[in-house]
Amino acid sequence: MEVRVCTSEDSCRYARISELFVYEKFSKTPVERVEAGDICAVCGIEDIQIGETIADKAFGKPLPAIKVEEPTVKMAFSINTSPFVGREGKYVTSRNLRDRLYRELERNLAMRVEDGETADTFIVSGRGTLHITILIENMRREGYEFMVGPPKVINKKVAEKLLEPYEVIF
């Protein structure tokens, strides 16, 4: 089945869906077509990003893109260099750490990862300390062993003014 994959009105490409499934109770059922509102699984489209619209090849129009808020806190992740290295986890190298952090970007929209000053350090940015703490705890449970630096607030400069993130709590 040929479809259009659109990021915006100007940016569309054609793709082919190899399989299409809808969820019924606790299983997936193969189908020929889905309609708006159906919860489905699509197979065969490469390089699809969250927020892109999959539409009919001839008549489809893209939906407005999802706006994800920018990160507000960053932390340095690095390999464990303490004398107890290798006792807590099975994934201890910078390659393991890098692969896991970049894999997290595939499903975590608000997270950003950058290479640090050294080859074994990575700067992870998120929506807050809780956001990054959840990642840390999940990685530890998966068997990753690493060190984490203190959280730092991400400040922005707009028109020569220094802006600091804040949150309104009701």
Image (spheres, rainbow, N blue to C red):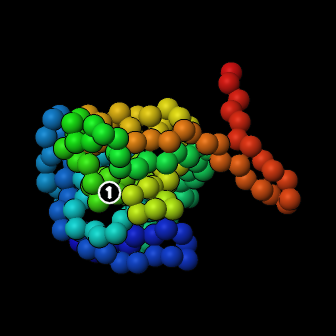
Instruction: For label 1, count other residues whose C-alpha is less than 10 Å away and answer few (under 14), some (14-19) or many (20+).
Output: some
**Which residue position is annotated with label 1?**
94
Q: Nearer the viewer, residue 14 or 164?
A: 164
Picture coordinates of residue 68, whole percent (x, y)? 56, 50
Picture coordinates of residue 62, whole percent (x, y)? 49, 65
Is 25 drawn above or below residue 153 in the view shown? above
Q: Is residue 2 visible?
A: yes
Mark 1: secondary structure: helix
Residue sticking out furthest to the front: 83
Picture coordinates of residue 128, whole percent (x, y)? 56, 37
Residue sticking out furthest to the right: 160
Is 143 drawn above or below residue 18 in the view shown? above
User: Residue 34 sits in which quadrant?
Assistant: bottom left
Quarter of the image that includes the C terminus: top right
- Judge left or right: residue 157 versus residue 85: right
Amino acid type of disc 1? Ser
Quarter of the image that includes the N terminus: bottom left
User: Residue 27 sits in which quadrant?
Assistant: top left
Q: Residue at x 51, y 76 (%)?
A: 11
Q: Residue at x 28, y 68 (%)?
A: 45
Q: Is residue 51 visible?
A: no
